[in-house]
Amino acid sequence: MATRTADPHTTGGKFTWRERLFTTLQKRGAIAVLILVVAVSALAFDNFLTAQNLQNIVLQGAFLGLIVVGMTFVIISGGIDLSVGSLLALGGVLAALTVPVFWPLALILPPLFCGLIGFGNGLLIAKAKMAPFIVTLAGLLGIRGLALAFAGERPIGIDGGSPFAWFGQGQIFGVAVPIIVVLVAFAVGGLVLARTSYGRVIFAIGGNEESARLMGLPVDRTKIIAYTTSGALAGLAGALLAARLSAGDPNGGLAWELDAISAVVVGGTLLTGGAGSISGSLAGVLLLSILQNLINQVGTLGSYAQQLVSGFFLIVVVVAQAYLTRRQRV
Amino acid sequence: MEQQAPVLEVRRVTKRFPGVLALDDISFELRPGEVHALVGENGAGKSTLIKVITGVYRPDEGQILFQGEEVSFSEPRESQEAGISTIYQEVNLIPLLSVAQNVFLGREPRGRLGLIDRDRMNREADEILKRYGIRADVTAPLRSLGLGVQQMVAIARAISVDARAVIMDEPTSSLEAREVETLFGVIRQLRQEGVGVIYVSHRLDELYEICDRVTVLRDGRVAHTGELAELSRLQLIAHMLGRELADVQKEGATGFGEEHETAEEPVLQAQGLTQHPRLREVSLTVHPGEVVGLAGLLGAGRSETAKAIFGAEPVDSGSLKVGGEEVKMGSPAAAIKAGIAFLPEDRKSEGIIPDLSVKENIVAAALPRLARAGLVSEKAQDELVEEFMQSLGIKASSPDQPVRELSGGNQQKVLLARWLCMNPKVLILDEPTRGIDVGAKAEIQKLVDDLAVKGLGVILISSELDEMTEGSDRVVALRDGAVVGLLSEDEITEGNLMELLAHGEDSGNGAKENGRDADG
Amino acid sequence: MARGAAADKSFDVSTATSWVRGRGVYVAFVVLVIFNLIVTPNFASVVTLSTLLITVSPIILVSLGVALAIGTEGIDLSVGSVMALASAFLPLYLGYGWPVAVLVVLLVGALAGLVNGSLVAFVGVQPIIATLALLVGGRGLAQIFAGGQSLPITDPTVLWLGQGRLFGIPAPVILAAAAVLVVGFLVNRTTFGRYVVAVGGNRSASFLSGHPVRRTLLAVYVISALLAALAGIVATARLGASDPSNIGLLIELSAITAVVVGGTPLSGGRVKIMGTVMGALLIQLITNTFIANDLPFTWAQVLTAAIILVAVYLQKGRGTA
């Protein structure tokens, strides 16, 4: 039987210049486009490069950014997490509900509870071997239902005087708190992914799960941790967003899973897993956020223009990736 | 070699799968500093034995001792941590990660803050590779390297963990001759370091060059174990194929009859089929009413030849004619249209469509002919299905029963029906009787015989010697992807065949083979 | 190894679970109907029934296409966005008469399907990813064509498609029923239907049997997009105005749920048309039941999620021989 299994590496070809170009485009494309967009925008709009506007851009992307960190882990491991938008809503609702009880709890409970749901997703995926797509799709539906039920289908206000609001609205040395949180998340996420064994195993699973198992790597545990992290970060993002808006909105984060996936993929992470980077995802988030900012500046375009551009980016990236993965697998 | 306490010992291990006894009371010993060949044909139990040793499977009965202590691994990680490294035939590494990352995956050297020390990792990986004479840029992504080098990296990873036992499952199947030499250098070094090596391969030359002892498995049992040097090639093959040299002449155990009358004009001519690195200039012809056996040991290129003819695998070069007409290579649809039918070896993954009914499976290939304007004619379909279910004796509760619920033999008959209802000119059978019960086996053999009598050209691939010798009118022997010899009519004896498989020379000349082929 | 291992799986267990898998959705539906007959006031009325059927019609239309895609071991996430595109294009060409407008909309749908299908069949992109791009971008494109606004529909023929009746049967229901018949016929009676399940059941075997694997995949995504475009027309007509930002929003989730709950395995190889219809009816009835009884409707979503997980978990027991 051994010889019957097709050998996926028969070409064993050289690293051609075309492949090199694609790889570079894939890895650095988002950053290059980001720089280009920033440069063009700076020339086209006078108030683009002001500190205030830049802060706005980053702040706009901060909450999505937290989700994107977790999503990057999940996608590199070869999975997908569709439940993050709903988890963000649930996190916001939980935060709004707990602030009156004891406000520090509003920072702890949402990531904890959402992390627990993520853990459940991970269990079903890693242990029951169910498809990540369908498990988290059920999560998307069910968790949104939970958030709506907990909130009584209405946004729940948060007292602006509560110290909790500072985590959404406050500043440290002139930098908004959510920005600092998301930057820390990106830094830690980047280190974990690039410089720890755990991060390497994530790549290995996404690259070839069967090989990873035969190499004796802890596949199931690693996957469960990835989904747990994704859930916890979505919950935290929900809490911070609630602090920012002074309300927990059970309808918040609608379709954010798509934005998060787009940011990750545009940032050069293979949707099939095994390759990608946190820095690329950061560039992806900023790119989406700048697009939104530009659309606001132009004023005549609706939010749909951003969807269109993300969709276009996705197609380009996905076709390039298909080319790449085909080269590997033929 | 002097007797030492074994580093690894398998004691009376039995492993069952539903309906299959994969390992039957196997005992096996690996001594330190020896290279132990593990050989056997497909289904002999090699893979299962390796998986039992490495903890992928748990044995149903028996014990495994490692360095004198009983062990019970529940997953590959545990056996690796204990000191048993395995190199799989397919490169089991992560193509997108760098060489160094692959070597150290899961046990990276740490620096400050517990983070991976990349410089040290690259340096150490480089040292490991150099120590075994492997040249590669450790920072390059693995997939940018040639397959041989990738395999060497897998080996470097396996031995850099201070393993006491290394299992190599057909490590050379993707290596060039030069790389094989490097690998043997590594193995000799391991031997000197007192590591025990289990070496699985079907390449006899390699076995005799590098191995000290040999264990032959057949049908889940140990057929022979002992010093390799004391065994001739012929004896080794006899053990693998389950024959005593004395009685290779016996006859009549199969359902096959006598030789067939063959027409002058060949119905199929394949010339110079080359698919690097698996096939080299393979040529063969089939006449109407003739059964041509394609013989060879595991990995010799039998299935690859069949698939190349059928267009299921692309070829680098070569041509194909059916009934004198050129057939487009690389397209099963074109091959089917030309009148070629192909029963693949792997019934489950390439043959049956498990959830579809017996009926739907039978008419799968004939659909375009049974349909008018895209509508399937139920009547034509039912008639055809009934005819073939009856003539082949397919036992199913009804034509609508899902084919996955049938026994192996009946599934195989369903697949035969799928092709016979196409009225093919050439039928390629890859291991048609593997894994099916004795009764169904004889029926299928008889059927093949009848078909040939009716003028069908048949290419028969079988690992079973008697099937090969009694079923074929002519035998083309392959080794390492090239034709090494031909036997016809009275020459076809088990003895001659084994002789050819053991010693046949690769002529390496397509034109010449072709000429000989035509003469045969 | 493992010679002929799959042949003798324990039969009683697998037949029992396969019975539940095959008919679970019918049982659940009947149970829910009985529950409603007892609990819900005025459940057994023509109004209730016709509301249920009208609401579920667009879902059934897109579910049929998604069922085909899942049957080939793929998926189509773009159906909601294709509906939005249809909604955006419908009023634009009504000036040339309703046949032109409907034709243009169907062409747009076919084009969307060609994009999806080409990515899957020829470029070799995973279906989930290939159709994700159109899910994200398609709605934006629709809004651009619509100029970001909702246009009223006045053409009576088009309006009839959403609001009219024939012999007392609502037009959307007639369209959905017709689509069920056509797709059912395609799946059960034509070579194309065989190719779909063969490609999904065992792609290598299908290829080795000479089936046109790529053409089949392409056709499946085109059909799915066409059905979604039709659903977009119906939804727009029912609303009496185009609404590209909301029409078909998240309908891909309902469709996937309907297909999976209806017993079509996510791993392909089977397409259950009636099961899909029942699946769509079931999830719509769950929602309606919660609303009609003043139960917090959001728990309906939680229940649906639980049903998906159970359905998929049950599928895992199926023999992969």
Image (tube, coloured by chain):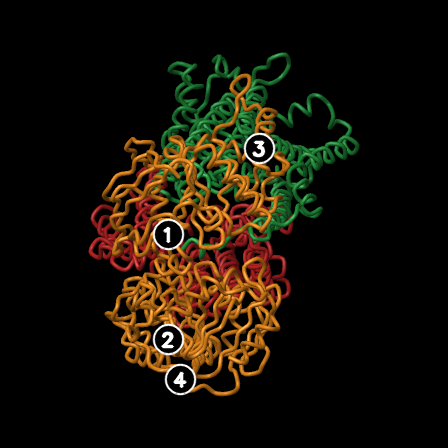
Q: Are marks 1 and 2 on the same chain?
A: no
Q: B306 or A109: which is nearer to us?
A: B306
Label 2 crowd bin: few (<14), some (14–19), many (20+), radius 10 Å = many
| Residue located at (58% from left, 48% from top) | A328
Residue shown at 70% from the left, 21% from the top:
A51
Q: Name the chain letter of the residue that bears numbered label 1.
A: C
* Chain C on-screen colour: red
Callout 2 and callout 3 share a chain: yes
What residue is shown with label 4? B260
**Which mark sits nearer the N-terminus, 2 or 4?**
4
Kindly indicate the quadrant of the structure image that contains residue B466. bottom left
Q: Which residue is mark 2?
A: B471
Q: Earlier in the sequence, mark 4 or mark 3?
A: 3
Specify the farthest residue to the right: A43
Please give the residue where the numbered disc 3 appears in the rendered image.
B131
Q: Colour of chain A?
A: green
Q: Element type at marker 3?
A: helix
The residue indicated by pointer 1 is C260
Q: Which of label 1 and label 3 is nearer to you?
A: 3
Residue at coordinates 36% horizontally, 40% vertically from top-left? B30
Question: Cα distance, mark 1 to mark 2?
Answer: 49 Å
SS class, disc 2: helix
Q: Is residue B466 left or right of residue A322?
A: left
Chain of the residue under the numbered disc 2 shown in the image? B
Pick the residue in front: A114 or C6.
Answer: C6
Label 2 near label 1: C-beta < 8 Å?
no
Q: Do pointers 1 and 3 mark residues of a single chain? A: no
Q: Are marks 1 and 4 on the same chain?
A: no
